[in-house]
Image (cartoon, rainbow, N blue to C red):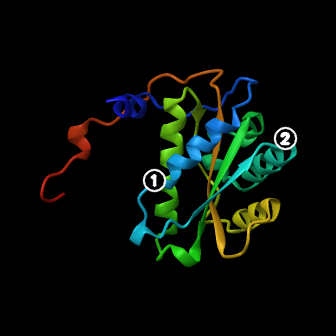
Amino acid sequence: MELDKTIKERRAVRKYKEKGIPDAVVIELLDLARYAPSSLNGQPWHFIVVKKDETKKRIAELKNKYCPPEKRAYKADFLQNAPVLIVVCVDKQKSYGREVENGVLAAANIIMGAGSRGLGSVYMTAYNTDEPKMSEEIKQILAIPQHIDPIAIIPLGYPDEIPGTKELKPLEEITHYEEF
C-alpha cells in the first residue's frame, strides 16, 4: 500500500530547496529504473546524471527555446535550480521499435522512487516531435552517441513548494469494459 500512497500523492514539483541529494539516493533511484519492464527484455535505457550548474542552465535554455508558445504553461528555467537532473536515454538498436515506451517506464520508476524518498520531480520530454533539433542539441551538450536518443529529463530535489491536489477525471469516465 505504500506504493499506492506514493502514486496518489505524487505532484509535479518545480521548486526545490537548496539542498543536495546524496549520491547514494541517486544510485538507488537509478537501480529502481533498471527494474522497469521492457519489450523482449531489451533494457535499452541509459541514464545521465547532471549536477553541473552550467550544463543544467544550457538544458533549461534549450527546453525554453524549443517549447512551442501554446505549451508554455511553465518555463523550463526551474531545471537549473534542481540539484540533480537525470536524463533518460534509450538505445535505438536494442529497443525493437519501442524505445520511448521502454524509457518512459524506467522514468516512471525513478519518479515514484523519488516520491517515496521525499524528493520532488516532474517528467519532461527531452525531444520534440515538431522540432527534432532539440534532441540533437541535447545530444551535443551531453556527448550522447548517435544511436542513443534522449527521451526524458527528470529534475530531482527536496520540494520547496508542493502543488495542491490535482483534479482527476472520475474513474467511471475513463474506464470501459469489453469495448469502448
Task: Quote the CA–CA distance across marks 2 and 1.
Answer: 30 Å
Question: Which residue is farthest front?
Answer: 24
Q: Which residue is mark 2?
A: 53
- Is any part of residue 167 visible from this angle? no
Q: Which is in the foreground here, disc 2 or disc 1?
A: 1
Quarter of the view holding residue 139: bottom right
**Circle 2 crowding by C-alpha within 10 Å: few under 14, some 14–19, many from 20:** some
Residue shown at 74% from the left, 29% from the top = 20
Residue 82 in the image, given as x and y percentages of width and height? 72, 35
Q: Residue at x 40, y 34 (%)?
A: 7
Which residue is at the front of the view, 69 or 88?
Answer: 88
Regarding mark 1 in the picture, which secondary structure is present there?
A: loop
Nearer-N-terminus badge (2/1):
1
**For the residue marked with disc 2, what is the amino acid?**
Asp
Who is closer to the viewer here, 6 or 176?
Answer: 6
Task: Please state which amino acid type lies under the numbered disc 1.
Answer: Tyr
Marks 2,1: beta carbons within 8 A: no
Q: Nearer the viewer, residue 163 or 74?
A: 163
Q: Image quarter for residue 24? A: top right
Task: Tell me the SS state at disc 2.
Answer: helix
Rendered view: 106 above or below 98: above
Q: Looking at the picture, how far across and down is residue 154, in whole percent? A: 62, 45
Kindly give the residue lying farthest to the left in the view shown: 178
Answer left or right for 12 relative to 61.
left
Rendered image: mark on residue 35: 1
Q: Quadrant of the C terminus?
A: bottom left
Label drawn at residue 124: none
The picture places residue 49, in percent across and down from the top left corner, at 71, 49
